[in-house]
Amino acid sequence: MSADGPVTERKPIRSFRDLLVWQKAIDFARDVYGLTKRFPPDKRFGLTLQLRRAAVSVSSNIAEGHARQGKEFAHFLSIARGSLAECESQLHLAVVLGYLTEPMTVPLNDLASEIHRMSASLASELSY
């Protein structure tokens, strides 16, 4: 036990699937798909598709980066954060256009912020 409390052991990271940040990115994409079902049908090939692609890109870049390791992994984590920012911008646009309400986007924006912090922390660990 440390002075801060019990020491918890980390599970070994054998696959990108073991990364909590990847798991949260999958949840994020699932939730984006759920929200975009509310968009008007005529937006299916516009904002809906763009938002879904950006959401899928987050977990995909985390997985691809993990396969490459090292500084390349940090680069792919940066790309994932860029895709998160793209999603946040598009969610805001969906509110402005009246497809969603602000309260509907709060949980997704909170999850995006959490993923952003986790990926930035992981990237900084890779830089050492």
Image: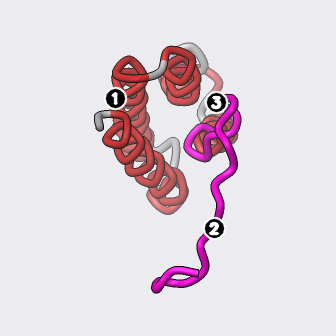
Q: Position of residue 2 (x, y in %)?
A: 51, 80
Secondary structure under tag 3 reads: helix
Q: Position of residue 38 (x, y in %)?
A: 65, 40
Using the image as rendered, state which of residue 100 and residue 119 is in the foreground: 119
User: Is there a contact, CB below 8 Å, between mark 1 and mark 2?
Assistant: no
Based on the displayed image, in which of its 4 quarters is residue 40 positioned?
top right
Q: Which quarter of the figure is the C terminus placed in?
A: top left
Q: Compared with residue 13, is residue 49 higher up or lower down, i.e. above or below?
A: above
Secondary structure under tag 1 reads: helix
Secondary structure under tag 2 reads: loop
The residue pinned by badge 1 equals: 78
The residue pinned by badge 2 equals: 8
Q: Residue at x 67, y 43 (%)?
A: 12
The residue pinned by badge 3 equals: 16
Nearer to us of marks 1 and 2 is 2
Q: Residue at x 59, y 72 (%)?
A: 7
Q: Residue at x 65, y 61 (%)?
A: 9
Amino acid carrying mark 2 in the image: Thr
Based on the displayed image, in which of its 4 quarters is residue 13 positioned?
top right
Q: Compared with residue 116, is residue 71 higher up or lower down, i.e. above or below?
A: above
Where does the magenta region start and end?
1-22
Q: Position of residue 50 (x, y in %)?
A: 49, 20
Going from the N terminus, do you reach mark 1 or mark 2 first? 2
3D distance between C-alphas at marks 2 and 3: 21 Å
Number of callouts: 3
Using the image as rendered, state which of residue 128 and residue 79 is in the foreground: 128
Amino acid carrying mark 3 in the image: Phe
3D distance between C-alphas at marks 3 and 1: 16 Å
3D distance between C-alphas at marks 1 and 2: 28 Å
The answer to whether residue 126 is magenta is: no
